Amino acid sequence: MHGVFDIIGPTMIGPSSSHTAGAARLGKMARIILGENPATAVIELHGSFAQTYRGHGTDKALVAGLLGYTTDDVRIKEALSIAPQSGLDITFRIIDLGDSAHPNTAVFHLTGVHGRQVKVVGASTGGGSIIITEIDGYTVELTGEYHTLISIHQDKPGVIALITHMLAQDSVNIAFMRVSRREKGSQALAIIEADHALPEHILTAVSSIPSVKLALLIPPL
Amino acid sequence: MKINFTRIDEMIAISDSLQKPLSSVILEFEAQRSERPQNEIWTDMKASLKVMRTAINEGLAQTDKSFSGLVGGDANRLINKINNSPGLTGSISAHAAAYALSVSEVNASMGKVVACPTAGSCGILPGALLAAGEALDADDDDLVRALFTAAGIGMVIAENASIAGAIGGCQAECGSAAAMAAGAITDMAGGTPQQVSHALALALKNLLGLVCDPVAGLVEVPCVKRNAFGAVHALLAAEMALAGIESVIPSDEVISTMHQIGLSMPRALKETSEGGLAKTPTAISITARLQAGKPANL
């Protein structure tokens, strides 16, 4: 069952919940996944995003999200001119990901101010809801509705057990969990979504596991 | 007591058994669902009301066009007309239409709105409710209560049908918004829960089958003006229900019907811009101009 504010809400900058509000949330999620302020962004637009992005302000909203703005921030309208002033270099491209990709898909190639790079693929699925489907080549399903822990680590026995043990010690209830890897023994990615806030020391603890290359905490959008 | 409903008749039965108004039942439901205190939820809804009111005032004054140039300035035109000469539709209806246009135009020009239930239909509920509120001398608490009633109706529709144009056509967006507004206004005007149910059924029935055919894929044509019609439509449904006029088909059956109609509606008429008004010669040339990076040049 939906909640009251799924119906009366979200409060948002128009004109489209999927092409504007959802786009802003995609940008914001990509920024959080990068883990630092973005310095350059190449954004590829597919499908309906590619066809109607100007009229819906999808480009402005995606960039606003990269700047960290929420869906109701009146600065969204000016995001394309604010970005260069904030040291964010933006390039848009139109791509065709084929019929199997969601029509409202954006691909972000981001480089942060400290040099971290990430590729994030996500789609706006309607009503402002989003799904991140790929991070650096790993298949994921990330909706931004839950408190989420992401770990990129070496694929070897015991890493997941260590992480879940740490969560259990803090009485964190795992709502959803997904583990994927590129190939056996290489880098793997774990996404853990929880009902309640994940304490900051979990991030420190997970980051300190020797096999973990990167850990991120993502609050609900 | 654990509050749970997925149908309008269940929502009314809970209201009857607890001897509480619909708005209180829905507020309690949300408090249980979200595990948040009622006063916080109330404050958030009051903030939504403020955004709605600001959008109305902003849009009435604004004569700017949207990015495409297809819409903008019509709320201003209509409010000037009703302020300067006696209207044909009556003051409350004309104001509801002007307010609804206003919010939708603000949406189209990248201003701040509350999606209710969607951005494409964001003018109907605030337009009709605030115009009715002025006529009924309602205060902010009355309006916030009405917004909870509207939310409850929308939740049931989302559960049993859809509020997305891509799934159910415009009936799912503007139809749902008009049903929510009709029920909320009936409640605010002192109607019984049964009358609320009839009001939403009457409003929704008359918008069944409405297709979603936006020109150039934008939330502009015919969406913005359709919001004005939806707001007046909601007021009339409330007026009829408050007079004791009943919908022969109960609201829950109308909602299921909307779902069935949405399923059988061709894809071309569900927000794909592959049919309806979006495929008229004028729309095709507008689309071509916009895709070439030129203004729509009406």
Image: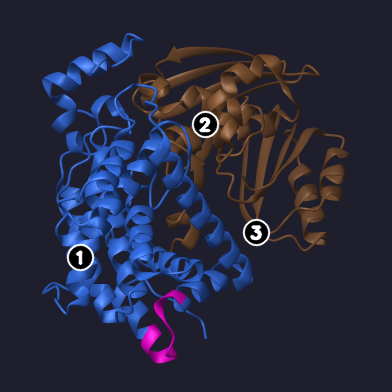
Looking at the rendered image, the disc whose residue lies closer to the viewer, 2 or 1, is 1
Compute the Cα span from label 2 to label 3: 22 Å
Q: Residues within 10 Å of mark 3 (few under 14, many from 20)?
A: some
Which residue bears the numbered disc 1? B237
Of pointers 2 and 3, the one earlier in the residue sequence:
2
Q: Nearer the viewer, residue B145 or A131?
A: B145
For label 2, the SS is strand
Q: Are marks 2 and 3 on the same chain?
A: yes
Magenta span dominant secondary structure: helix
Residue A122, label in figure: 2
Q: Amino acid at mark 1?
A: Ala
Which residue bears the numbered disc 3? A195
Residue B169 can be seen in this image = no
Which chain hosts label 2?
A: A
Q: Nearer the viewer, residue B127 or A181?
A: B127
Magenta stretch: includes residue B15: yes
Whether the residues at callouts 2 and 3 have beta carbons within 8 Å, the answer is no
Q: Is residue B111 left or right of residue B181?
A: right
Q: Amino acid at mark 2?
A: Gly
Q: In the rendered picture, chain A carries what hue? A: brown
Q: Amino acid at mark 3?
A: Asp
The x and y percentages for residue A127 are 43, 45
Q: Is residue A188 above or below residue A221?
A: above
Q: In the rendered picture, chain B carries what hue? A: blue
Compute the Cα span from label 2 to label 1: 41 Å
Whether the residues at callouts 2 and 1 have beta carbons within 8 Å, the answer is no
Q: Which residues are magenta?
A: B14-23
